[in-house]
Image (cartoon, rainbow, N blue to C red):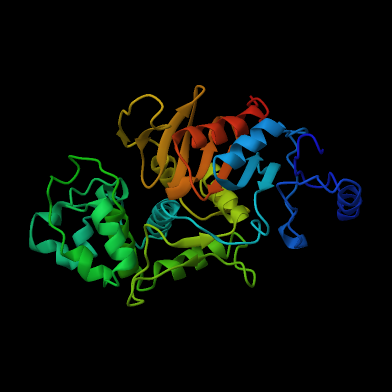
Amino acid sequence: MSETKTCLRGRLTWRAVAILLSLTPLLLLPCVRPAMAQEDWPPSATVQHGVLSAEQIRRIESDGAIAYIVLQEGGLVAEFYFGRGAQFRTEPAYGVAASVTALLLGSAIGEGRIAGLDDRAARYLPALTTDARDRITLRHLAVNGSGLAWQEVRDLPRVLNGGVNLTRYMEAFRLDAEPGSRWRASSGDDFLLGMAIERVLGKSLASYASSRLWLPMGLTAAGRAPAWAMDAEGRTTLAACCLHMRPRDFARLGQLVLQLGRWNGKQLVPQRFVEEATSAQVRFEAPPGATLFDGYGLGFWHFTYAGFPGAAMLGDQGQVVFIVPALSLVIVRLGVRGDAPGLAFALQAGMSIAAPPTK
């Protein structure tokens, strides 16, 4: 235990940990078992060892991680926290929120509140009817292919720091490419998608997430429900970012996606939508080593690693939830910084302790 510094459920009692720490003052475990019994997570029945080496743990920490969780077949394989109280803090999801927005789109379609992905966005956002933006569909927004002249480096800081009214700001954008003709990572598309969902539902995206996801998934206990920020005027949810959750809640989201939108016997998001969202709708190339990702779906990134295809919810500073369906695997890595090599190592480390796929 002291050599590998694993933190598997049930391996050590708190009394045993206290004894070990009193005998070996220099022993520093990078993780602490959450104290709340209702949050206890059963260990994986498939992977009995779940051991990362001390070298792997040091590398994950040195890459800027503050939390690292591995699930297989819904059971906990490994869990590490770097920093006091990290397991209890809510962490910013950044771009992971775009994946949640896509799941809420799927839920609204499943409820019949939205006809489908190929609905025109202008049906829900009338300001788009005045010009060529009328051709933008919800699919274009979900896949970041609207063609709007949003510039991520310029416009995202203005939205987050400039105190703008998000609705007016987004409705002012014009096209600089034909809808569907170009892919470009765009928080602006995610903001518009969230606005469209809010218009048709007549409630905030945060409120809809609470009823459709957080409540049935058991994430609404006092003091631990995910929190989603609004724009400066408190009217519009910041759908592309600004969602805060505890590390295990990120893992639960990954498990929901792995289970194709089903949780405790209830279909929260239509299976067909999840399958489409996590499949590459757009393929792109990057210089070797620059990125793990080879495509983008509907709010989800696509990758293939060691021959295994998967999907990811990805945010700034290395916030990532990997889903590898063939291995029934979910890997969560949250951090204060992150780069392509660090994310690749986090994925490789989790896959290294996973059991082979069952047939």
Q: Residue furthest bottom?
A: 233
- The residue sitting at 50% across, 37% down in the picture is 343
- Residue 186, horizontal then vertical, whole percent: 28, 50
Q: In the shown orientation, is residue 302 left or right of residue 174?
A: right
**Which residue is nearer to you in this view: 92 or 162?**
162
**Which residue is nearer to you in this view: 82 or 222?**
82
Residue 8 in view (yes/no): yes
User: Which quadrant of the structure image shows residue 71?
Assistant: top right
Query: Is 307 rendered above or below residue 245?
Result: above
Q: In the shown orientation, is residue 315 left or right of residue 198?
A: right
Q: Quadrant of the C terminus?
A: top right
Q: Residue furthest front?
A: 26
- The residue sitting at 28% across, 69% down in the picture is 162
- The residue sitting at 44% across, 40% down in the picture is 275
User: Which quadrant of the structure image shows residue 293?
Assistant: top left
Query: Is 208 rendered above or below residue 29?
Result: below
- Residue 356, horizontal then vertical, whole percent: 65, 25
Query: Is 107 rendered above or below residue 161?
Result: above
**Which residue is nearer to you in this view: 265 or 35?**
35
Q: In the shown orientation, is residue 209 left or right of residue 1?
A: left
- Residue 332, horizontal then vertical, whole percent: 57, 44
Q: Quadrant of the N terminus?
A: top right
